[in-house]
């Protein structure tokens, strides 16, 4: 087979589409290499003629022009480039999006395109949810973490100094466009951070997927196209199923927060951006696994498997040295899942089987935090 035909064949094998089933608000997730710049993937989801592409200073030089070229020539297209980093995920930065929309005279039939990682996606989604009481937006995630997690499901918002993602709204996109080729320019640490969320899906819902990840971690870190496409697809499938069952996190959707209660505490205490979200979640999942062991649910073999796959993904295993029990608990008490001052945690009955747990004895949780390795 000629080289270009082989490339086209591989590309076709690596492209797939999923559906998030939410009735009239259902939307597709398109996955594959080379999707950016192709109008067939994005044009059908535009609400009207006015389009605002919002991105950041890191992504703009790489992909902004490519996305713009993929839009019909007769549209009114504006661009907004924001600073990069978790520290920018604030109401002040969202206000810049509102300012740009108002200054350009955008109406209710406009469409916002979120081009970037989870920070951009969350802020643009929140701006879309609140501008003129709700306008259309499309997620174009360029990091692995955003592709498998934050771009799917409609959670939008910003951070508060006392807690992560405390201000926001549920607002679903019109579509999610995942171009796996963007991962080639992603720094290794950010790619590993995304793998934490991929591993999470295996730990909470799919033991077979977890075993597949153990076998294919080297291929994923080498950016093998077919391995990446399957890992992203399966992650998005699991999230789409959970979101369809519980859009506003009244029940089963909370399972997606495995490791996040511990992890968000690390992020907030260390200062947003000091630890990558996936790095903090990786440690948080190990702490949740250790607490599950203390409850008698997991054995030493399961703990070792969890540690091994987190390590194989290139993620840290130790918590920050300057966080003691009280530093963790102060932040964990502010978690959105909590009810009546009780810290709710996602724990594992077995690998691939998680549940939301309200009844962790305080002494057991404190001992888990106290004994966990620091670095």
Image (cartoon, helix red, strand yellow):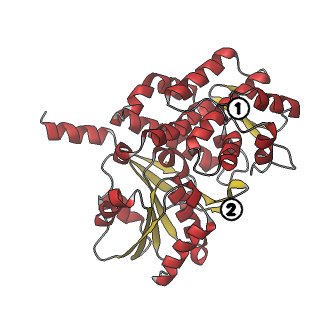
Q: How many marks?
A: 2
User: Which x, y percent locates residue 2?
Assistant: 12, 36
Q: Earlier in the sequence, mark 2 or mark 1?
A: 2
According to the picture, the residue beneath numbered tag 1 turns out to be: 288
Callout 1: few (<14), some (14-19), or many (20+) C-alpha neighbours within 10 Å? many
Q: Is residue 108 visible?
A: no
Left or right, 58 with respect to 198, comes to left
Residue under the point 34% across and 62% down: 67
Relative to 48, say whether 258 is above or below.
above
Residue under the point 34% across and 46% down: 181
According to the picture, the residue beneath numbered tag 2 turns out to be: 167
Task: Verify CB contact (< 8 Å) between mark 2 and mark 1.
Answer: no
User: Which x, y percent locates residue 238?
Assistant: 55, 40
Mark 2 to mark 1: distance in Å?
Answer: 25 Å
Judging from the image, what secondary structure is the residue with disc 2 in? strand
Q: Quadrant of the C terminus?
A: top right
Callout 2: few (<14), some (14-19), or many (20+) C-alpha neighbours within 10 Å? some
Q: Quadrant of residue 74?
A: bottom left
Q: Name the foreground residue: 193 vs 22.
A: 193
Judging from the image, what secondary structure is the residue with disc 1 in? helix
Q: Quadrant of the N terminus?
A: top left
Left or right, 70 with respect to 273, comes to left
User: Which x, y percent locates residue 336?
Assistant: 74, 51
Q: Is residue 74 visible?
A: yes
Residue under the point 60% across and 70% down: 92
Q: Name the foreground residue: 66 vs 350.
A: 66
Q: Name the foreground residue: 118 vs 89.
A: 89
Q: Name the foreground residue: 275 vs 229.
A: 275
Left or right, 75 with respect to 100, comes to left
Relative to 219, say whether 255 is above or below.
below
């Amino acid at each position: 087979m000629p080289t270009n035909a082989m490339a086209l064949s591989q590309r076709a094998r690596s492209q797939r589409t999923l559906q998030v089933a939410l009735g009239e608000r259902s939307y597709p997730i398109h996955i594959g290499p080379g999707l950016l710049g192709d109008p067939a993937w994005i044009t059908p989801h535009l609400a009207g003629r006015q389009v605002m592409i919002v991105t950041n200073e890191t992504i703009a030089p790489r992909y902004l022009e490519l996305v713009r070229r993929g839009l019909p020539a007769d549209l009114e297209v504006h661009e907004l480039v924001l600073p990069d980093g978790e520290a920018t995920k604030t109401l002040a930065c969202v206000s810049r999006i509102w300012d740009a929309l108002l200054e350009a005279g955008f109406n209710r039939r406009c469409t916002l395109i979120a081009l970037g990682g989870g920070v951009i996606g969350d802020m643009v989604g929140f701006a879309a949810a609140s501008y003129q009481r709700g306008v259309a937006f499309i997620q174009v995630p360029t990091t692995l973490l955003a592709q498998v997690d934050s771009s799917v499901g409609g959670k939008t918002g910003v951070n508060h100094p006392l807690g992560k993602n405390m201000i926001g709204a549920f607002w679903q996109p019109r579509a999610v466009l995942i171009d796996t080729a963007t991962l080639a320019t992603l720094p290794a640490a950010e790619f590993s951070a995304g793998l934490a969320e991929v591993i999470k899906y295996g730990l909470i819902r799919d033991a077979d997927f977890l075993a597949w990840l153990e076998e294919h971690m080297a291929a994923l870190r080498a950016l093998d196209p077919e391995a990446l496409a399957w890992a992203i697809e399966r992650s998005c499938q699991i999230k789409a199923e959970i979101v369809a069952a519980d859009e506003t996190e009244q029940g089963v959707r909370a399972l997606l927060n495995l490791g996040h209660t511990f992890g968000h505490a690390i992020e907030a205490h260390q200062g947003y951006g000091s630890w990558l979200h996936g790095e903090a979640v990786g440690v948080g999942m190990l702490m949740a696994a250790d607490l599950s062991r203390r409850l008698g649910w997991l054995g030493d073999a399961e703990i070792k498997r969890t540690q091994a796959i987190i390590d194989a993904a290139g993620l840290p295993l130790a918590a920050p040295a300057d966080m003691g029990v009280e530093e963790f608990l102060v932040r964990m008490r502010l978690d959105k899942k909590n009810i009546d001052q009780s810290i709710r945690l996602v724990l594992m009955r077995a690998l691939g089987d998680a549940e939301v747990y309200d009844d962790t004895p305080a002494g057991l949780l404190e001992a888990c935090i106290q004994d966990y390795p620091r670095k």
